[in-house]
Amino acid sequence: MAFLDHRPLFPGHCLLVPRQHCETLGDLPPKLVEPYFSTVQLLSRAIEIALNAEGTFVAMNNRISQSVPHLHVHIVPRRRKDGLKGFFWPRNKYKSEDEMRAVQEAIRLAVSSLTV
């Protein structure tokens, strides 16, 4: 299951979580590793397309800096000189509910176009 981060690094910053509860990557059952990371790959491509991004940043914390005790991968759209440096990640909110929904719909459409 994927959803927009409520305080994104950049618009389109998504979290991907497995439906089955797993606290860390080490807890993810082996049979779910491939489908989970195939979905990470799909969502990364979709975010680039949907937001005309030059690339993505894909990250996961295990226990340390893991603010929610459920496995999740951050997929963040990136552009050259976007200001993201090292591990200082200034978080922001969407300007409006409409902006958030527009970004969400663009990503949803890109996922659909990639899975046809």
Image (cartoon, rainbow, N blue to C red):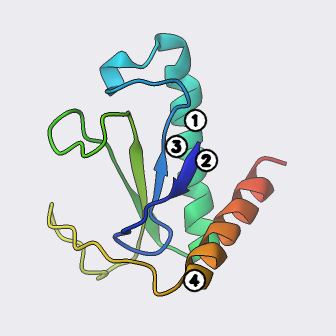
Q: Circle 4 sits in a helix, a strand or a loop, which is it? A: helix
Lateral position of residue 57 relative to residue 109, left or right: left
At label 3, which amino acid type do we have?
Val
Residue 38 image label? 1
Crowd around label 4: few <14 · some 14–19 · many ≥20 (10 Å): few
Amino acid type, residue under disc 1 in the picture: Ser
User: Callout 3: few (<14), some (14-19), or many (20+) C-alpha neighbours within 10 Å?
Assistant: many
Residue 106 is situated, as x and y percent measured from the top left of the image, at 68, 71
Q: Label 1: how many residues lie within 10 Å, few (<14), some (14-19) or many (20+)?
A: few
Residue for point 15% across, 60% down: 87
Residue drawn at point x = 47 percent, y = 75 percent: 11
Q: Quick one: SS at disc 2?
A: helix
Q: Which mark is residue 40?
A: 3
Question: Which residue has dot 2 on it?
Answer: 42
Distance between mark 3 and mark 2 Cα atoms: 6 Å
* Disc 4 to disc 2, C-alpha distance: 23 Å
Compared to 51, does 115 lie above or below?
A: above
| Cα separation between marks 1 and 4 | 28 Å
Labelled pair 3, 2 in contact (Cβ < 8 Å): yes
State the residue position of label 4: 99
Q: Residue furthest bottom?
A: 95
Real-space Cα separation, disc 2 to disc 1, in angstroms: 6 Å
Helix, strand or loop at disc 3? helix
Q: Nearer the viewer, mark 4 or mark 2?
A: 4
Q: Give the CA distance from mark 4 to mark 3.
A: 23 Å
Tag 4 or tag 1, which sits nearer the N-term? Answer: 1
- Work out whether 107 lies above or below 15: below
